[in-house]
């Protein structure tokens, strides 16, 4: 994965073109001061899940970057295993749309929709 995913102990359970499943075992470091999983942890799961689902669809030399994500949080999580399932909704030549659902056990706790730019990186201006 990448250093940030390693930092929060985010695991890829499955990854294929247009789909991914990630998991995270809730630990004390994931909680906010109220003892609830911080929204940023769940957001990071959705964002990373979307990238993981999109990445296998990219051509050689292409990369992707988040343009925007909208997330709805439905229920608080205090412990257990979180699972993020992501599906590609639409992929154009330069923009892709994906949807992630985050579950605690079988309970839907958040849902996100995101758009990603698809491009070949150019030379740096610096």
Image (spheres, grey):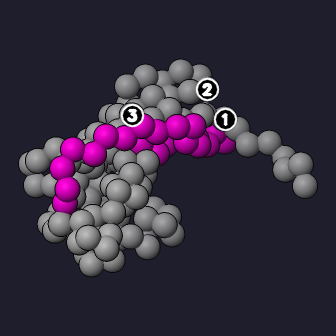
Q: Which residue is mark 2?
A: 94
Picture layout, residue 87 above or below residue 34: above
Image position, residue 25 (x, y; %):
23, 68
Judge the density around disc 1: few (<14), some (14-19), many (≥20) Cα neighbours within 10 Å.
some
Residue situated furthest right in the rendering: 126
Picture layout, residue 76 above or below residue 37: above
Cβ–Cβ under 8 Å for marks 3 and 1 = no
| Disc on the earlier residue, 3 or 1 | 3
Residue situated furthest front in the rendering: 34
Image position, residue 89 (x, y; %):
37, 25
Q: CA distance from mark 3 to mark 2?
A: 17 Å
SS at circle 2: loop
Q: Which of 42 and 85 lies nearest the eye of the viewer? A: 42
| Disc on the earlier residue, 3 or 2 | 2
> In front: mark 3 or mark 1?
3
Which residues are the magenta region?
49-77
- Image quadrant occupied by the N terminus: bottom left
Q: Which of 78 and 100 lies nearest the eye of the viewer? A: 78
| Disc on the earlier residue, 1 or 2 | 2
- Residue 49: tell me if it is visible: no
Q: Is 20 one of the magenta-colored residues?
A: no
Image position, residue 51 (x, y; %):
46, 45
> In front: mark 3 or mark 2?
3
Q: Which residue is mark 1?
A: 119
The answer to which image quadrant residue 11 occupies is bottom left
Q: Is 72 one of the magenta-colored residues?
A: yes
Q: Which residue is mark 3?
A: 113
- Residue at 73% x, 43% y is 121
- Residue at 41% x, 42% y is 50
- Residue 87: tell me if it is visible: yes
SS at circle 3: strand
């Amino acid at each position: 994965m990448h250093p940030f995913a390693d930092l929060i102990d985010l695991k890829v359970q499955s990854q294929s073109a247009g789909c991914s499943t990630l998991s995270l075992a809730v630990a004390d470091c994931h909680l906010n001061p109220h003892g609830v999983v911080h929204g940023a942890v769940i957001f990071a799961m959705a964002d990373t899940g979307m990238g993981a689902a999109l990445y296998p669809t990219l051509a050689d030399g292409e990369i992707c970057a988040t343009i925007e994500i909208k997330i709805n949080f439905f229920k608080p999580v205090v412990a257990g295993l979180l699972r993020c399932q992501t599906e590609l909704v639409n992929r154009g030549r330069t923009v892709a749309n994906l949807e992630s659902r985050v579950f605690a056990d079988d309970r839907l706790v958040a849902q996100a929709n995101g758009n990603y730019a698809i491009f070949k990186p150019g030379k740096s201006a610096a």
